[in-house]
Amino acid sequence: MGGGDGGGGDKMAVCIAVIAKENYPLYIRSVPTENELKFHYTVHTSLDVVDEKISAMGKALVDQRELYLGLLYPTEDYKVYGYVTNSKVKFVMVVDSSNTALRDNEIRSMFRKLHNSYTDIMCNPFYNPGDRIHSRAFDNTVNSMMMQVC
Amino acid sequence: MEQGPAAGSAAAAAAAAAAAAGTGGLLLPLSETEQQRYSELFSRCCPPPEAAAGGSSVGELFRASQLPPDTLHQITEVCGAKRVGYFGPAQFYIALKLIAAAQSGFPVRIESIKNELPLPRFMALKNDSEVRYGTPAELHGAKFQVPHATLEKNSYKRTDEGDKQEPKSPPMSPICSPPASPSTYQRIPLSYGYGKSRSGLEQQHGAPYEVRHSTHQQDGPSSGNYGAKPALGSSTLNRSLSAEREQPESSAHYSDDPWRITEEQRDYYINQFRSLQPDLNSFISGSVAKNFFTKSKLPIPELSHIWELSDVDCDGALTLPEFCAAFHLVVARKNGYQLPEKLPETLLPEYLQAASLKPIRDCTLFDSYSEPLPGGQQTRDFARTEKASAEEVPDNTALLQDAKKEDKQALKGSTALKTIPKEFQHLTVKTAAQESNALKARPRSRSYSSTSIEDAMKKGEEPPTPPPRPQKSHSRASSLDLNKIFQQNTQAARSGWLPPPPPALPPRPSVSQTEQVSEVELLPQMNRPPSQAEENSSAKKEVVLTQPPSKPARRKLRTETQGLETPELSPTIHVTSSLPAVKPHLPVQKQSSKQKRAIQTAIRKNKEANAVLARLNSELQQQLKEVHKERIALETQLEQLRPVTVL
């Protein structure tokens, strides 16, 4: 993790997940650590917060609803950011709290890239919405955003 | 092992004619290798559950031995299959031994096979080359027995096989390759000449293909301990090297790049593209492409990856270069190549577009060869015929659409099809020019429509816009006759021949409507509205007879004559409302209209055939699914029972 910070002017997440509308994961990728499952738990619990934010926007504001949800909640080690698409597909990103260089703008741009990659997957006629994502292009995008752990 | 069945069927055959008595009592000594080889060949010609080899596959095998047909007949007789009526194991083995004897120069007699003989040699047998392809191997084996006109899957597999041939057989100079290149689309079971042409084509191919695929050829022979084949294989390699030197240009292209699309492959891809989407400048939608590529039986994740690689602009649709790239990747994958992580440079759309300008010109030659082929090698060129018909039908429908819309440009319409780049215009012009050939060719290709099921399927996915039906109730018979009569009558009219006046005029219903109709129809016409009307109502001739002689003047007086004619014409037009529809065609292209009608009928019949076959196909697929389920159920039962029995 220290090594990641050293190179860390780049945007580096620790875990990135794509959650379907029905709240099951389409894609989860995390930095390989000793206890990866904790990321899965974190993402799972963040879904509640995402739902809260979505519903809090109100029905009247549905059109103006922002896709970027911002910081969902901070834990002592990590910060969790959320993003939801118009089709209620959620992107959740977990970043290291100590990575203070990450700004909101950067997170937004990372989400935008994810969203673009996701739409590219959608264009593939062999992909059925609701399947797990196995696209190599998407993997590449995600990898570029993940922290490199030496 | 072999002697058991030989003795068994020998006993059954013992009651037969004396000539075969020798066969009946003979116990063939077979060496290990012979036994192996023979049993392998036998199982190939004869699926295990059956007791006898299929006659056709055996015949093909025998032909592949390159013995003269008389010798083969003799062998068939001597081995006892003719008498018995089938190729049982004994007959088959005896026949193989006799083939070996004949190939070694011995006469075809029972006595000669008592000696030690080398193994019989067969050309163009894909033994281990099939094994390499894993699952497709079974299908290949199945292909040997499955007759030509079968399920859509098999037919697609066969074109797939044709695809597989393509990497191995690039075209070189059009002169020598076209007779051979169509043969690459042949099915494997076809005659041994195929094998020759294949090996001939292999010569000119690049090194890696040679290395890979000629080893396939060599593995076949080597596994069978053939004497001649390995020599042939190595000579193939030698020839390939020399051929490569002869054609530095093509070798430079194909030297070591499996990701490079050859001319023939490109041509094939373009034809396939056309079958899905007649406009080569447009794109194939995702769902259409998905259905198409799903037929290749590759697993979905791989297809998904192929799509990712080839759909460069990520728009969910495939343009022609993207489609070619995707198809090429499918072909490569089926041939055992691993899919790359990144799209190779030679498959990029820009590269393909740039490269397409030159090779398309060569493609026209292939198109021209595809024309005589459907007429000629019908038994050999199913895929070609399919492609030709698939290619021609969209072209002809495109032609028809244009012809209908713009009379004068019936023939040029194909070239003026939106914004086709000039190289594709070559194709369309050629196919337009060969339309008449196509018409003759297509009735024949239609008879093999069972093999064009895949085309029906593809067409079913996105049928090209059907030609606009000629207006209203275009009654073919009458219009055909009347056309001729029109032509006759114009000249007759000019010469002043006056048909007898009509006995009575029928009542004139809806004059206004028919007036408009007649005006519209008469307008494009210059020369013969009244004469046609006369013929329209052959039963009711008009008094308009005075009109014909004044033809030249009629043009100026057109409106007047129309006004005059419409009252008379309206009843006739009402009665034969279909016929005026013919008029627009007449002015300029009599021939094209005839052709169009012929094309329309052919298209209609094709469509009906397609629909029937599509239905048949879907039914068969359902049956297949059910059979699969049953099989799975049975297998699971078997699995459950097995531990019980083993104990």
Image: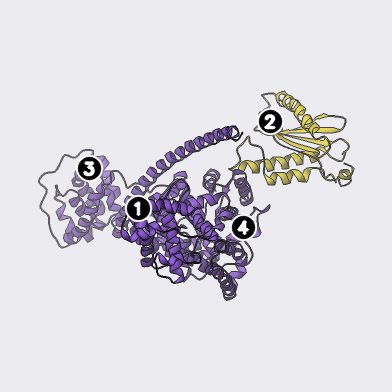
Gap in angstroms between the C-alphas marked 2 and 3? 68 Å
Mark closer to the observer (1, 2): 1
Q: Which tint is chain A?
A: yellow
- Tag of residue A24: 2
Gap in angstroms between the C-alphas marked 2 and 4? 37 Å
Gap in angstroms between the C-alphas marked 4 and 1? 37 Å
Residue B375 position in % (x across, y down): 36, 61
Mark 2 burial class by Cα count in 10 Å: few <14, some 14-19, many 20+:
some
Q: Earlier in the sequence, mark 4 or mark 3?
A: 4
| Amino acid type, label 2 | Tyr
> Going by the image, does A107 lie left or right of B260?
right
Q: Are marks 1 and 2 in contact (CB under 8 Å)?
A: no
Q: Are marks 3 and 1 in contact (CB under 8 Å)?
A: no
Residue A68 position in % (x across, y down): 74, 34
Mark 4 burial class by Cα count in 10 Å: few <14, some 14-19, many 20+:
many
- Tag of residue B447: 1
Does dot 1 land on a helix, a strand or a loop? helix
Q: Disc 4 marks which residue?
A: B347
Residue B271 position in % (x across, y down): 48, 56
| Amino acid type, label 1 | Ser
Q: Which tint is chain B?
A: purple
Q: Disc 3 marks which residue?
A: B574
Instruction: Give the quadrant of the C terminus of chain B.
Output: top right
Does dot 3 land on a helix, a strand or a loop? helix
* Chain letter of disc 4 in the image: B
| Amino acid type, label 4 | Leu
Gap in angstroms between the C-alphas marked 1 and 2? 53 Å
